[in-house]
Image (tube, rainbow, N blue to C red):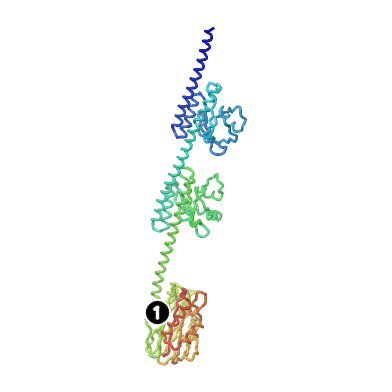
Amino acid sequence: MNSNFDNETSQLQYAHDRALNDKLMELQALFEMSQILNSSLNLKSILDNMLLTSMGKMMISKGIILLQKENDIFVVENLKGLDRSIIGKKVQISDFFNSPVFTREMSNEWVQFFQKLGIMVLFPVFSNKKNLGIIGFGGKIANLEYSQAELDFLNSLSNIAATAIERGLIFQELNEVYRRLDRKYQELNTLFEISKELNSVALDSNNILNLLIYAIMGEMVVNRCAVLLRREDRMELRLSKGMGNIDTEIKERLTDNLQQRLCSLMAPVSFSEADSHEYFKSLLAINFQVLVPMRIQDENQGIIMIGPKITKQEFRSEELEFLFTLGSQAMISLENARLFEEMREKERLEEELNIAREIQQRLLPKSLPKLEKFDIAAINVSSYQIGGDYFDCIKIDDSHYGIAIADVSGKGVPASLLMSNVQASLHSLIETDLNTPEMIKRMNNLIYKNTTSDKFVTFFYGVLDVENSTFHFCNAGHNPPYLYHHNDEYHLLEKGGLLLGMFPEMNYQIDSMKLNSGDCMFLYTDGVSEAMNDKDEEFGTERIEFILKKYKDKTAQELLDIFLSAIRGFTENVAQSDDITMVIIKVK
């Protein structure tokens, strides 16, 4: 009897010792597994060790791990014994479980995904009450059922793995952040270098465009690129690089509808056959895949068209952002080049105008004759433009002087050239035996023959007889000069004919005036009467008459200075668009 009791006691002790030993071995295995899982921060390595250790220990045929990416969405991250094509597949699991479950006992719709793969049991992965994912296992190789102890072991292993998986996810996220920062640093560095190049080249738009296109083709590894620049409401092709006849292909597809789309594009767009950008399909047909607006001051002033990568990879959002920044920087350089070119052109024109103005001034008399009976003064004040005003006082003989004043239509170099033609004609014809009407008729024919219909000259010419104090004149459409008498009466010297250059073979008439002591002749161009103030008011003839009357006793030069002072006081330094020319002849 004692022998049987001892035997039973011995068996119980053996069973207890074995259970305790199994428990110690299980704890030892969990401890070793914890060390293995926590020895790495690499997520893939953690997931590989988790599956391989569990499946090897339990003789399990297949295993799978899904991690939660967003609400209710789980993604296959790792697997063993299954088709690797399902890695990355997304599964929506809305009614999550908190403890190990057998898939055969569940009717949820999402469970069918695991059942089709032969996954029998699922373990939730929690860390700090946060759901990280799911670990699933298939059947055991010997077709044995999972014991409760095995389920407990796998569940404990899942809990241990949770901490390692969470650390791996954090490490993976940090690595991605570091990679993005490194890419951003590289892009900024590249952008800085290209910007330096853009700003270092001569301010020439062709150089800038060439540098931009080659930089894009090198950085993005593409073999086709083009730049369109905006002119009003259209995009015009400026430069393209790549295989084939790109220029013709692009121009053929720049329809009005596409032009409108391109002008309104404000952010980079990448498209393919699967995209909904129907209006860009015509560009896709000629092997362009990315459009990048070139913005400046929130306005789209150009488009960069880029072909697909040689590597067949898609353009990342960071690359589109890089291209957008680069395009805007290039647009600033192009705008600077345009402004520089405009400045150079303005300086060139200003230099030409200065030369023309200097030539024009040389055509005017350097000095006026000093006469015993007559006091003569004259001035030409140039506006900011070259005008066509002209005056002259030419000695014909000791008793006769030719007095001329003229105003050529228009402004700038053409007017200046025509004025020089008038001056040359007058000087050449005055030396002939032609009378005044015939001389002016010849001048009219010369101007008509050598100018267009929109060019003409108002011209006044008279001969001053200093011995007999007479003045013979002809007015060809010019502002009538004043002959102001000392008794405050005046005549307008109007007789003559049409202005020069309008019609050929025109006849002109001459008139004569007797000049008496104190008389004053005032010849002027319309730059005097039409001088404007800041209220858009003209100086007018009434002010001219007032000055002639009030200051009739002044010398010619004094009267000229009074006129200039009055005009400047009236305009208050408002820039004038026409020259101011005056000739004053007073009888002493």
Residue 203, compared with residue 374, is above or below; it is above
The answer to which quarter of the image holds residue 333 is: bottom left
Secondary structure of the residue carrying numbered label 1? loop
Viewer-closest of 234 and 414: 234
| Image location of residue 231, percent across then percent down | 50, 59
How many callouts does the rendering have? 1
| Image location of residue 160, percent across then percent down | 49, 30
| Image location of residue 142, percent across then percent down | 53, 21
Residue 365, compared with residue 327, is above or below; it is below
Q: Return the residue found at the far front.
A: 2
Identified by mark 1, the residue type is Leu
Residue 50, compared with residue 298, is above or below; it is above
Q: Which residue is mark 1?
A: 364
In which quadrant is the C terminus drawn? Answer: bottom left
Viewer-closest of 427 and 28: 28
Q: Is residue 507 visible?
A: no
Viewer-closest of 371 and 72: 72
In which quadrant is the N terminus drawn? Answer: top right
Q: Is residue 493 visible?
A: yes
| Image location of residue 538, percent across then percent down | 51, 78
Viewer-closest of 262 and 327: 327
Q: Residues within 10 Å of mark 1 (few under 14, many from 20)?
A: some
Q: Return the residue found at the far top.
A: 1
